[in-house]
Image (spheres, grey):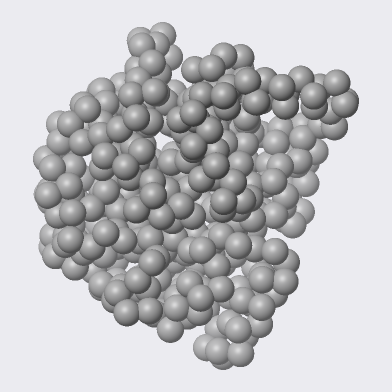
Amino acid sequence: MAARTLVRPRSSAERRAVGARVREYLQDPFLRSLQDEIDKVGFLQSISLDLTHVCQLRCEGCYFFAEEMDGSKAPKDEAIFDEFVASERARGTNYMTVLGGEPSLQLGRLKKLHDNFTILPVTNGIRRIPREGFEDMTIAISVWGDHELDTMLRGAGKIDVFAKALKNYRGDARAGFYFTATAGNAGVIEGVVDEIVENGNTVYFSFYEDKNSLGGAFDDSQGYEEVRREIDRMIDKYPDRILTTSYAAKVATTDRLYDLQWGYDVCPIVSANYEKNFARMANGQPYSPHFRAYLPDLKTVRRCTVGEDSDCSQCHNAYARHTWILINREKHLGSAQEFTNWLTSVFMFYVSGGAISRERGLPLLPEIHERTRAAREDYAKAG
């Protein structure tokens, strides 16, 4: 699993029944091989960290600046940063999503994090993270559409951020683009994916939240049915390059996971030491008791990865939605297909986040996509 969870206590009989069902499904050699790769890594005790309050961009819809989180300043004293690293190591943290602000503007501190944890820096791609010292680090590069859309949303209509990122990470096996798809712009997806794959990189999909009320094609309330269809076409076109399955895309865009409706009451990555979250953690829904979302001052935690004021029911944070699947294993035990949907989601999470290397993970993608193809069949009902 991606994180240790807290759920209601189970009886011995319930635990035995769950264990027997999992062992039954793992008799499938391919699923067993995925589980073995996950077991080599073990549990991810994760946090998110805003490494800096500084960024070269002000993207339309960026939660960090929308909620003025840059008011929290990264400490100048390196000893304070070193103390934070030591404290998180002592607490058992072994995985970190590094955000901001722009992580590439703090390469020295990024290197310290890389030396102590498995990390996934999320970068705009304008400044290249060098290979030296970061050879085996997975890098997530944001892109929000084709060159025209991305320039409008992230480059203030002037900077072709996508083009700069492609140039900086051409042929770089460390780099995967996190494509934030907008609801009404499904038609640009193939062209963007074509460029990324030709550039030698992988693609993971997330979904745009219209925080700035741009409306029209950016209005996420219109749904993502056409976007999902395009994602499925890209999976068929590039089965060894797409790190989002049909099943994960369906859950992320329909707001449903079996009998659960997406929102704050089920989000699994809320800061466990944040007083306002205590009622959420007592409601019986699973969550990660280790997780904390740190602001740049390295002391303050916020409600969750995306901030204090956002409407959780409208949140499309990819990390949160994917973790929602991972943390609800028992809901996926009703059939071999359901368990396959769950286990492949865990594996994809580990690969896309760098916990399992691309070298080991990418060759298995075509079979994973074939095994999760069934998720496409109920789009009409779920959409």
Depth check, front residue: 74 or 21? 21
Report whether residue 333 is seen.
yes
Q: Which residue is drawn at 66% across and 70% down?
A: 88
Asked if residue 340 lies left or right of residue 157, the reply is right
Where does the image place residue 223, in percent across and percent down from the top left? 35, 25
Instruction: Say which quadrant the N terminus sits in.
Output: top right
Q: Which residue is drawn at 57% across and 14% down?
A: 335
Where does the image place residue 158, in percent across and percent down from the top left? 13, 62
How many callouts does the rendering have?
Answer: 0
Q: Which residue lies furthest to the top in this view?
A: 381
Q: Is residue 294 above or below residue 361?
A: below
Q: In this view, does 21 lie above or below 154?
A: above
Where does the image place residue 142, in percent across and percent down from the top left? 30, 55
Q: Residue 162, located in which quarter of the rendered image? A: bottom left
Asked if residue 146 lies left or right of residue 22, the reply is left
Q: In this view, does 118 lie above or below 230?
A: below
Instruction: Say which quadrant the C terminus sits in.
Output: top left
Report whether residue 311 is seen.
no
Q: Residue at x 61, y 76 (%)?
A: 85
Q: Which residue is drawn at 27% across and 26% down?
A: 232
Depth check, front residue: 240 or 292? 240
Q: Residue 205, located in which quarter of the rendered image? A: top left
Where does the image place residue 197, in percent across and percent down from the top left? 17, 47
